Image: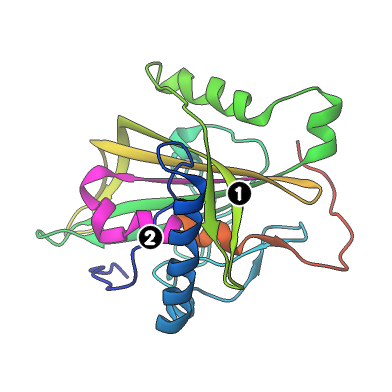
Amino acid sequence: MAMRIRMTVLALVALPLTGCGVGEYQQRIEQGVKELSSSSVYQKLNPSTPIGDTPVEIRVPQQFEQAPLVDGAPIPESGEPPEPTRVRPLGLEIPGLRLTYEGHVEDSAGGKIPYYLYVSVADKETHARRKADLTARLQALFREVLPEARFDWQQVQVPTPQGGGVDWKYTRLDAEQPFRYIGPEGDVRKVEMPGVLDFYHRVEGDWLVTLIWRLPRSIVGSVELDRWAPMVAGTVKVKSGDAPATPQP
């Protein structure tokens, strides 16, 4: 069911460490975490969910009302696997892609504008043996469809539910791209729109974790991307006591 998303939660944005002093940035993080705790904003996230068959877990906003899409697995609405362009960002085969969360914002005409969170968990040792840099591989993949894309990775710190912060690599792409728009009568069509791609990348235990948010620029505010994206990244963790799953390249 589509939602009109107008939430009033604290704005806590993942900011690059460059451009302001580390001390000043840390003060903002600590104050933000304190206010987040008092406002119980983390209650608006679902409980921790395993990412595929790995010991890595994540919490996502409750605005993702449906179960995540899995590449090649049937979906309840049709019993058929989702289209590649729906489950993969721009149809690209992302290394370690496990889950795709799909949400919608209803427009003034009653149509549904989509937005996505793609969750990738790849085995660190496999990439180390191949001497592969996953961020470089992602750049090469996206430049196939967005040749003008520039990846300016920055080190950012995001809040965690326990308090404090954790480091991630982050970059944003802003480019015209196709989206799966659902019209008021239920008709599905591809619509080109100015869009945003936010990438978060981190080594978590024995795993390389990549979170990719993709949505039209027109609904960035409605989805509250700059609030939810860093918070979701801060919930990623490896469940203790679990043996690593079968690696996926």
Local SS, label 2: helix
Q: Residue 192, can we see it?
A: no
Residue 232 visible, this orientation: yes
Residue at figure coordinates x 40%, y 16% from the top left: 147
Residue 183: image x %, image y %? 19, 53
Please tell me which of labels 1 and 2 falls first in the chain: 1
Say what amino acid the circle numbered 2 marks: Arg
Segment colored magenta: 209-229
Q: Is residue 193 above or below residue 50?
A: above
Left or right: 206, with 4 as reference point: right
In depth, the one of 96 and 230 nearer the eye is 230
- The quarter of the picture where residue 63 lies is bottom left
Q: Which residue is mark 1?
A: 167
Q: Residues within 10 Å of mark 2 (few under 14, many from 20)?
A: some
- Kindly give the residue lying farthest to the left in the view shown: 109
Query: Residue 171 location in percent, x, y?
Result: 46, 36
Label placed on residue 227: 2
Quadrant in which the C terminus appears: top right
